[in-house]
Image: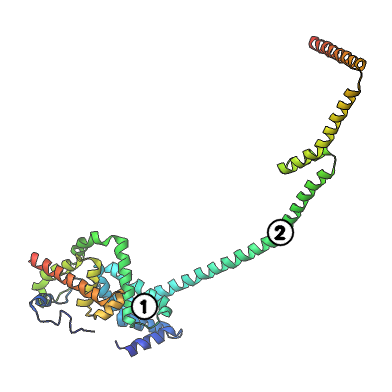
Amino acid sequence: MNQNTEAEILAMIQDPATRDTGFLLLMNTYQKQLYWHIRRLVVCHEDAEDILQETFILVYNHIATFKGESRLYTWLYRIATNECNRHFRNKDFRLKREELLTEHTSELAVGPELENSEDIIRKFQQAILLLPNKQRIVFNLRYYDELSYEDIAQILQTSVGTLRTSYHFAFEKIKKYLVDHD
Amino acid sequence: MIDQKSPVNKNTAEEFEFLRVGKELPYKVPEGFFETMPERTLQKAKVRLEKHKRQVFFKSGFVVFAAAAAILAFVFLLPNHALKQENQLVAVVKPLETPPENAVKSVQPNTEMDDEKTLSAKAPAVASEEENLEDILKNLSEEDLSELLAEYKADDLEEALSSETTNIN
């Protein structure tokens, strides 16, 4: 997604005549990557669906407050991440983490060539789920979404130095977990 | 968006572990989820926006109504209140102009200050009466005084007799 397309979508949403079309275009462009960002954090599909929907409803109702100081997708990630953080607080997520993983990984979405990797994929997710929330968010944004530290810094409103440290700790903890549970 | 410093792009033994895992996830999404999601979300967003607009409308309507009610109450109640206060003032002032006996009664529901004022207005008259009696007593002769004593004793006797008769009846 380049800046020009972002600007076009924004212009469509801000014009009352094309608002709905612009919004649908925005959702079709970003919903998958936002869904997976949310799903990796909350694990449960129903929760991920609710948070994704809430994220886009907030965008629809507050698009006028977007000043264009950051990229549109970092703004979307920021709203989605804030909603996830709210979810963690409301549902006492930390206590349910391990239960969630066993409940929601029964149907493994891996291809036939990765069937032997099923176990390592589960362990890897378990290791990520055991991380503190901030480290988990940083690790996911960096490893799965491949965002730059600068973009993550904008999303989480923190410094690049702090993010590098968080990622390093997360990496070390996951590595240790995989070695211990091999 | 891919950063050259990303561990995915590094070829070290540590990252190899991650590369073995790849980016596959052990999660599944219901079929057709991404196709229906945008339209469902749009409908929900519209409903939410309408609800929000209605809330804002009712809130602002309530504020306007409350302000109008306050103004009307002020306009209608202020003259009555002012009239009441005026009447109360008249009620306080009038008894002070009438004889002292009535003044004490009419002023009683008001303040202690007013009571003190009426009493102090009455006090000089009593004092002058006492002075007159003293003067009169000073000017009496011994014979007059003995007559008065006799009258006083006779009064006591009459009182005693009358009380005895009432007890008998």
- From the top left corner, tell me how far across and down residue B9 is, in percent: 14, 82
Circle 1 — which element? helix
Is B18 or B56 nearer to us in this picture?
A: B18
- From the top left corner, tell me how far across and down residue A137 is, in percent: 24, 71
The reply, left or right, for residue B75 in relation to residue A154 is right
> Neighbour class for label 1 at 10 Å: few (<14), some, many (≥20)?
some
Q: Nearer the viewer, mark 2 or mark 1?
A: 2
Q: Are marks 2 and 1 on the same chain?
A: yes
For the view shown, which residue lies furthest in the bottom direction? A4
Q: CA distance from mark 2 to mark 1?
A: 58 Å
Circle 2 — which element? helix
Name the amino acid, label 1.
Answer: Glu
Q: How is the image coloured?
A: rainbow
Which chain does the residue under circle 2 lie in? B
Q: Residue at x 32, y 88 (%)?
A: A3
Query: Which image quadrant for residue A48?
Result: bottom left
Q: Is residue A44 visible?
A: no
Query: Which image quadrant for residue B12?
Result: bottom left
Name the amino acid, label 2.
Answer: Leu
Q: Which residue is mark 1?
A: B39
Quadrant where the N terminus of chain A sits is bottom left
Quadrant where the C terminus of chain A sits is bottom left
Res A170 label: none
The reply, left or right, for residue A159 in relation to residue B53 is left
Q: Which residue is mark 2?
A: B78
Residue A20 vs B102, above or below: the answer is below
Which chain does the residue under circle 1 lie in? B
Q: Residue at x 57, y 66 (%)?
A: B63
- From the top left corner, tell me how far across and down residue B54 is, in percent: 50, 70
> Neighbour class for label 2 at 10 Å: few (<14), some, many (≥20)?
few
- From the top left corner, tell me how far across and down residue B122 is, in percent: 81, 37
**Labels 2 and 1: the sequence-earlier one:** 1
